[in-house]
Image (cartoon, rainbow, N blue to C red):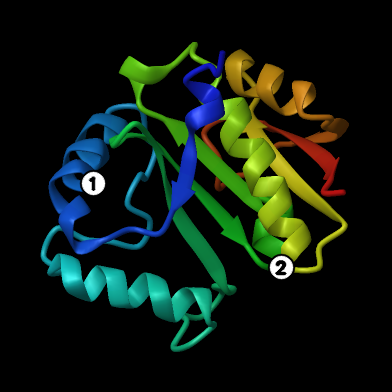
Amino acid sequence: MASDADRLLLRALRLSDEGDVVTAQQVMAREGFPFALGRDDGLPFADYLKKLEDAQHGRGLPEGWVPSTVLLAEVDGRVVGRLSLRHRLNDYLERVAGHIGFGVLPEYRDYGYAQAMLKQGLSLAAALGLTRVLVMCDEPNLASRRVIEKCGGVYADSYVGSELEWPVRRYWLATV
């Protein structure tokens, strides 16, 4: 019998997702997690979707940004989280964010969704030609640490920087 995590689907955002994304942004903002990456409240949702599409193809990126893909994690029609995949690293991403970032909404934690998201993210990274990716988590975030390690993450080091509230643990993961 398939678990809920086995039914998790990573997919592109759609115009019909606006309400779910706005709600998720508000919920996750309480934890300091930017659910709707690159979106400000004044930006119409259709324009936000265009911005995500452009970012995926590397068009019109702000200074310091790299091509990236942002996907919703969905189970049985419910948005449970978000995954972002940076197609390459720059100096900043190598220090503090890595290739893959993921977040699960609080009400959907402890169901295996984060692990399913990261595994699917590794497959997507492999499809981009990446053989290994850098994934990070805040030092005190034991749940994310366990997810990364269960997915094969090899601890590299911890980084402490003035741009961070907490030190981050840096892990390398094979994509194949």
Seen in the image, is 123 located left or right of residue 108? right
Point out residue 50 in the picture as x, y percentages from the top left corner: 30, 77
> Around disc 2, counting alpha carbons within 10 Å, would you say few (fewer than 14), some (14 to 19), or many (20 or more)?
some
Q: State whether residue 144 is above or below residue 60.
A: above
- Please tell me in which quadrant of the rendered image residue 153 appears: top right
Which-is-in-front pick, marks 1 and 2?
1
Seen in the image, is 136 located left or right of residue 172? left
Point out residue 104 in the picture as x, y percentages from the top left corner: 43, 29
Q: Nearer the viewer, residue 153 or 4?
A: 4
Q: Secondary structure at mark 2?
A: loop
Point out residue 72 in the picture as x, y percentages from the top left corner: 40, 47
Spatial separation of the CA atoms under disc 1 and disc 2: 25 Å
Name the disc covering residue 88, or none: 2
Name the disc covering residue 82, or none: none
Name the residue at 80% across, 37% down.
171
Chain-order first, disc 1 or disc 2: 1
Name the residue at 71% across, 57% down.
125
Give the residue number, with chain letter if any, for mark 1.
21
Q: Amino acid at mark 1?
A: Val
Q: Amino acid at mark 2?
A: Arg
- Please tell me in which quadrant of the rendered image residue 150 appears: top right
Q: Secondary structure at mark 1?
A: helix
In the picture, the quarter occupied by the N terminus is: top right
Q: State whether residue 12 is above or below residue 59.
A: above
Name the residue at 53% across, 24% down.
5
Q: State whether residue 72 is above or below residue 129.
A: above
> Can the viewer see residue 97 in this picture?
no
User: Would you say the residues marked 1 and 2 are in contact, meaning their CB atoms lie under 8 Å apart?
Assistant: no
> Can the viewer see residue 34 in this picture?
yes
Total residue callouts: 2
Name the residue at 86% across, 30% down.
155
